[in-house]
Amino acid sequence: MSLLARPAPRGLLLTLLLMLTACQPAPTQTRIQGKTMGTYYAVTLSDPFPGGEPALQQEVDALLARMNHEISTYDPNSLISRFNQGSGQPPMAIPATMAKIVQQGIDAGHLTKGKLDVTVGPLVNLWGFGPDKRPVKRPSAEQIASARQKVGIDRLTLTPEGDHFLLGKGIPDLYLDLSTLGEGAASDEIAGLLEQKGVHNYLIEVAGAVRSKGNNAKGKPWRVAIVEPSDQPGAFSDVVIPNGMALSTAGSYRNYYELDGQRYSHIIDPASGQPITHKLVSASVITPTALEADALDTALMVMGPEQAMAFAKAHGLAVYLIVKTEQGFAASHTPQFAPYLVAKQP
């Protein structure tokens, strides 16, 4: 059972774990995996974890279950569901862990001028990518306009009070959806758990959100591949060495459905109220935290190729974009991304 059910995983990153040959002793390495947020997670360590693999599995699953209770819109009893079901007055008390995710959504929304909007839930649900069922026909202009009236981060308030925060909304129908940030937040939380346990060599993957630190069991830096959005299994566009930074990738080509001969992506443009239709199919971002990278990759996908690259350069971001062309897929990146790329063999 998935801890934070959400349709169709992004799964855009393929981990390249360097293994020793069969004639050599196998390196000491611990790996656990499972399902969360409607997708997969995997944690690989080249350091020992106190209590071994069973303790690692138990503690990671407990952490993800706690996050599920806070931010799952698929759990009617979660904190976020109770917030969405209520009027928002008086504001609702939420823990600092959840508030951190909300604040990142607000900050990224302002930075990207609304391209990321964590209140876009009514539109996500209208198009069938939330807890609601997929529509049997395309939503009408009137339905889209009505849903857009319920969207806007300026109507969301977050106020610190003691050891918790107060979450409020300006209109009763405001609907908060943190699913686009959940994978990055989970990667960061697992990294924090490992650091507390004295583990400093690890690779964490929660679908497209990756955190890594140190080296693998061979003593080499962790390598992660950016998958090419093609029909060829295992095809990848480039390989990066994050060097302790977080890497998150969003894409439009795996979570979609077709209706009346047209493909609809799960990424919704808050300005139009409709799924994106441009040629940008993948956006990868490297930042210090996976939460920040997870927020930015979605916003870049909403922007489209030209605006996304201009935004990344203007803000000095390490960004890698893949665009679908008539000749296939074309990749480009900002200068800040170049140091993380593994040089290709001639």
Image: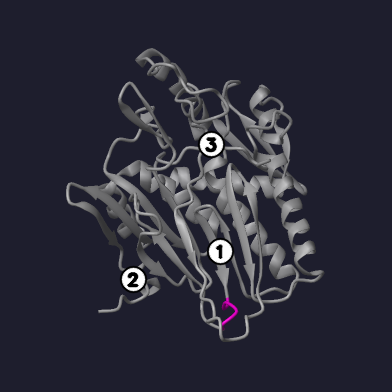
Residue 72: image quadrant is top right
Residue 87: image quadrant is top right
Q: Residue furthest right?
A: 51
Query: The C terminus appears in which quarter of the rendering?
Result: bottom left
Callouts 2 and 1 close, C-beta under 8 Å = no
Q: Residue at x 52, y 30 (%)?
A: 121
Q: Residue furthest left?
A: 326
Of labels 3 and 1, earlier in sequence is 3
Q: Residue furthest front?
A: 23
Q: Residue at x 46, y 58 (%)?
A: 13
Of labels 2 and 3, earlier in sequence is 3
| Local secondary structure at mark 3 | loop
Please provide percent x and percent y for residue 104: 55, 48
2 or 3: mark nearer the eye = 3
Within 10 angstroms of label 3, few (less than 14), some, or many (20 or more) residues? some
Residues in magenta, as a range: 214-218
Q: Mark 2 is on which residue type? A: Ala
Q: Which residue is mark 2?
A: 338
Q: Mark 3 is on which residue type? A: Pro
In 3D space, how far apart are the residues under numbered discs 3 and 1 (Cα atoms)?
23 Å
Q: Main secondary structure of the magenta part?
A: loop
| Local secondary structure at mark 1 | strand
289 lies left or right of 322: right
11 lies left or right of 82: left
Please provide percent x and percent y for residue 165: 70, 43
Q: Residue at x 53, y 72 (%)?
A: 244
Q: Is residue 155 magenta?
A: no
Please provide percent x and percent y for residue 207: 53, 52
What number is the disc on residue 26?
A: none
Comparing 344 with 98, the one in front is 344
Q: Which residue is mark 1?
A: 211
